[in-house]
């Protein structure tokens, strides 16, 4: 495979799509031609207009911008809101190339919807998360019926510019990964919020409490990356027998956090199925096809 990514168009680039555009442009990965990005308003288009290698198109100024960008690109990333997707698929279908790889960022819209709207197209669902905006994302990708291993490799390279990539099987895999890495940053922010509250309970001011909580999470994650050990092992190293940490961990374990997180992710999975119009059922085994090294 060539080191150069094929021509890419982003149809709708809000905060997530914009982050991927910025990550791709900053990565140094060569792209065949400019990265074409369309947005409805000139104000939104202006936020990406100054990036080297990016052609930012405002549809209010160039109404045919979507058609032009799609016709010129092999990879087409759809970044509009889920409720707008059926209308968009209808509008772009005549312009999608025969060799196109259509990548969707929308949550709750199954692969079958895209394959019905774009018959024969190679479709890939992607579930990036918000840390992609700082190059620390985790993105799940799943291939549709017509996507080849080469297509998946191209999509993988695209998302590796903003973090790590995990390839899963089908809509079930994407819905499952959305409950962990997709929603996961909110879980972490909640834990930081609650640890800061505990610091205030121990007598620290607001600024000091947030510094302690935020710095502890950031440092623990950095240590996990640096050591290459399992989290349980690093926890054991911090937990001296009959010490203060052991006492605190016992309280947390008695709260059955494992069940709390299982219940939370099951609820998120059920909601993902509801949004897709599918009867919610318990998640089955997620087939991991390939992950970033």
Image (cartoon, grey):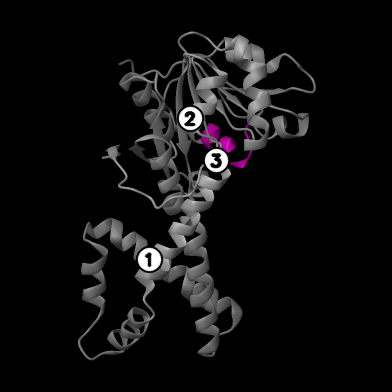
Residue at image mark 3: 276
Q: Which region is colored magenta?
A: 12-22
- The image position of residue 25, as x and y in percent, is 51, 29
Residue 91 vs residue 282, the one in the foreground: 282
Residue 225 vs residue 122, the one in the foreground: 122
Residue 59 vertical placement versus 20 (above, below): above
Indicate whether residue 267 is drawn in magenta.
no
On-image quarter of the C terminus: top left
Q: Earlier in the sequence, mark 3 or mark 1?
A: 1
User: Residue 45: which numbered mark, if any?
Assistant: none
Residue at image mark 1: 219
- In the picture provided, is 273 more to the left or to the right than 87? left
Q: How many marks?
A: 3
Q: Marks 3/1: CA distance?
A: 38 Å
Q: Residue at x 51, y 42 (%)?
A: 278
Q: Nearer the viewer, mark 1 or mark 2?
A: 2
Q: Residues within 10 Å of mark 2 (few under 14, many from 20)?
A: some
Residue at image mark 2: 111
Q: Residue at x 59, y 36 (%)?
A: 18
Q: Nearer the viewer, mark 3 or mark 1?
A: 3
């Amino acid at each position: 495979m060539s080191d150069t990514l094929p021509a890419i168009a982003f149809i709708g680039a809000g905060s997530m799509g914009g982050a991927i555009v910025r990550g791709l442009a900053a990565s140094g990965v060569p792209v065949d031609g400019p990265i074409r990005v369309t947005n409805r308003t000139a104000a939104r288009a202006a936020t990406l207009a100054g990036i080297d290698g990016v052609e930012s198109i405002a549809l209010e100024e160039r109404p045919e911008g979507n058609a032009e960008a799609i016709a010129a690109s092999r990879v087409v990333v759809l970044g509009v809101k889920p409720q707008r997707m059926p209308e968009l698929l209808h509008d772009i279908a005549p312009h999608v190339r025969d060799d196109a790889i259509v990548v969707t960022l929308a949550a709750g819209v199954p692969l079958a919807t895209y394959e019905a709207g774009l018959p024969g197209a190679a479709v890939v669902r992607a579930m990036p998360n918000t840390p992609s905006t700082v190059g620390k994302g985790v993105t799940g990708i799943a291939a549709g019926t017509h996507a080849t291993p080469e297509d998946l490799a191209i999509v993988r390279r695209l998302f590796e510019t903003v973090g790590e990539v995990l390839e899963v099987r089908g809509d079930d895999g994407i819905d499952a990964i959305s409950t962990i890495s997709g929603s996961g940053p909110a879980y972490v922010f909640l834990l930081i919020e609650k640890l800061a509250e505990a610091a205030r309970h121990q007598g620290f001011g607001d600024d000091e409490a947030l510094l302690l909580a935020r710095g502890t999470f950031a440092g623990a994650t950095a240590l996990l990356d640096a050591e290459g050990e399992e989290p349980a092992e690093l926890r054991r190293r911090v937990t001296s027998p009959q010490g203060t940490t052991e006492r605190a961990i016992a309280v947390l374990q008695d709260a059955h956090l494992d069940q709390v997180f299982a219940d939370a992710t099951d609820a998120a999975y059920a909601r993902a199925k509801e949004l897709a119009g599918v009867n919610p059922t318990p998640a089955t085994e997620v087939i991991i096809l390939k992950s970033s090294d």
